[in-house]
């Protein structure tokens, strides 16, 4: 579980900490982009009254102007939006091949903010993020008011549809509802990959997944397999899955890949993953092996609908050979599941 200490450089955690220290604070958020913009919608930069800042809204192109605007907002100015053209030359300097445009919303965060409940929203949001729970912050550009929505909250009409999409995709965007322009800032927990089995495929998969931005954990009670030498820099648990998962439960932003071929090791975490609603559940083995697995899981009380969520044989069919290629196929399937979770997607060719 994350702590605020581990989020030391996160701009939203920094903003909360600075407010608690009595500083005047402003938050700048990218709310819209066009072309090759350096930072995606939902990116943050937090600024205090001394001009200290944390985070980024442009990769360095316009931070100076945004900090200057933030200082004015802290000093009593109104919240508002800024729009910048990132010229080709400036874009090139921060690693882009061409320019773009970005719109940034700057608002005051301290306890005297005119926007109702702004600090309360920030604190509640950080608590949801620490607990790996998705949340969407809805900000009304008209009056600056914000509110926090948790997954499962009832929201009617067009706004409800937009909020559900934000939870599913994790993408932040502006919407117009009943004549009001709202920004939906989606905060979806970073994806986690839990691998059952410290096998050769796991070694390649751990490296690939970390490159793709996934936090990776390997679980295998076989101490000869689960060694730091075979998995350097990876969170490794040389214990039974039921022990590990009791301490760090699975959730719907976690993918689970069972790779041992051993029912004594694989079956329990597969059941736990299906019960927790993991966005991806995969298991290594042939169709014959999986048929026997299905019989065991049915006997354990799982429904046919639950079992049907298991990707088996695991991985996209790319005619993979060897551990490294199989790892590529598995990660591709995990990424596809993450990016299309909760959304009816077009058929993907295998």
Image: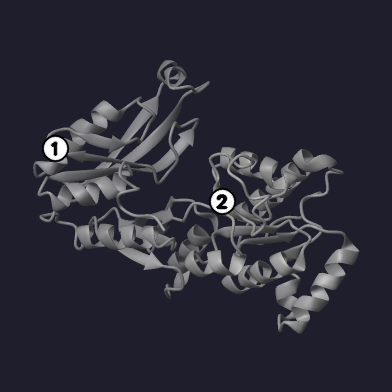
Find numbered disc 1 in the image and state the secondary structure of the residue it sits on. helix
Residue density around tag 2, few if under 14, some if 14–19, many if 20 or more, within 10 Å: some
Q: Which residue is mark 1?
A: 72
Residue appearing at x 64%, y 60% in the figure: 221
Q: Secondary structure at mark 2?
A: strand
Looking at the image, which is closer to me, 151 or 201?
201
Left or right: where 246 falls relative to 122: right
Q: Identify the residue at image location x=66%, y=52%.
A: 334
- Can see residue 258? yes
Residue 200 rendering spot, x and y as whole percentages: 74, 44
Q: CA distance from mark 1 to mark 2?
A: 48 Å
* Vertical arrangement, residue 141 with respect to residue 36, above or below: below
Where is residue 297 shown, x and y percent of the image?
A: 75, 77
Screen quadrant of the N terminus: bottom left
Q: Are marks 1 and 2 in contact (CB under 8 Å)?
A: no
Q: Is residue 30 above or below residue 132?
A: above
Label disc, if present, on residue 132 of the rendered structure: none
* Front position among marks 1 and 2: 2
Q: Which residue is mark 2?
A: 236
Foreground residue, 72 or 22?
22
Observer able to see residue 251: no
Q: Is residue 212 left or right of residue 178?
A: right
Question: Could you say where residue 87 lies in the image, as x and y percent from the top left?
Answer: 41, 21
Q: Residue furthest right?
A: 288
Whether residue 262 sits left or right of residue 215 in the image: it is right
Residue at image x 82%, y 77%? Answer: 295
Q: Nearer the viewer, residue 179 or 83?
A: 83
- Tell whether 202 sits left or right of 116: right
Q: Residues within 10 Å of mark 1 (few under 14, many from 20)?
A: some
Residue 109 drawn at (x, y percent) = 19, 51
Q: Residue at x 61, y 62 (%)?
A: 279
By what rule are the colours in the image chosen? one colour
């Amino acid at each position: 579980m994350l702590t605020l200490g581990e989020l030391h450089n996160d701009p939203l955690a920094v903003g909360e900490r600075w407010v608690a220290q009595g500083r005047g604070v402003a938050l700048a958020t990218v709310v819209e982009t066009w072309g090759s913009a350096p930072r995606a919608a939902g990116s943050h930069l937090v600024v205090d009254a001394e001009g200290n800042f944390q985070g980024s809204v442009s990769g360095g192109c316009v931070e100076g102007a945004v900090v200057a605007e933030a200082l004015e907002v802290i000093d009593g100015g109104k919240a508002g939006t800024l729009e910048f053209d990132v010229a080709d030359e400036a874009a090139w300097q921060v690693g882009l091949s061409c320019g773009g445009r970005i719109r940034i919303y700057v608002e005051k965060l301290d306890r005297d903010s005119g926007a109702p409940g702004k600090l309360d929203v920030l604190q509640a949001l950080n608590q949801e993020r620490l607990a790996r729970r998705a949340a969407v912050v809805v900000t009304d550009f008209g009056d600056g008011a914000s509110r926090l929505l948790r997954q499962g909250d009832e929201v009617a009409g067009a706004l409800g549809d937009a909020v559900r999409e934000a939870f599913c995709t994790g993408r932040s965007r502006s919407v117009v509802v009943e004549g009001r322009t709202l920004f939906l800032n989606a905060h979806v927990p970073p994806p986690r990959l839990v691998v059952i089995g410290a096998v050769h495929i796991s070694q390649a998969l751990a490296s690939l997944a970390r490159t793709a931005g996934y936090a990776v954990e390997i679980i295998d009670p076989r101490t000869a397999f689960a060694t730091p030498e075979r998995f350097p820099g990876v969170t490794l648990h040389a214990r039974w899955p039921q022990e590990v998962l009791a301490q760090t439960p699975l959730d719907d932003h976690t993918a689970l890949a069972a790779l041992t071929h051993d029912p004594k090791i694989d079956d329990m975490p597969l059941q736990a993953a299906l019960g927790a609603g993991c966005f991806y559940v995969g298991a290594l083995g042939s169709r014959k092996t999986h048929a026997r697995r299905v019989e065991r899981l049915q006997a354990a009380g799982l429904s046919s609908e639950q079992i049907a969520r298991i990707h088996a044989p695991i991985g996209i069919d790319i005619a993979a050979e060897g551990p490294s290629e199989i790892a590529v196929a598995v990660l591709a399937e995990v990424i596809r599941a993450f990016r299309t979770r909760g959304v009816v997607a077009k058929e993907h060719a295998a």
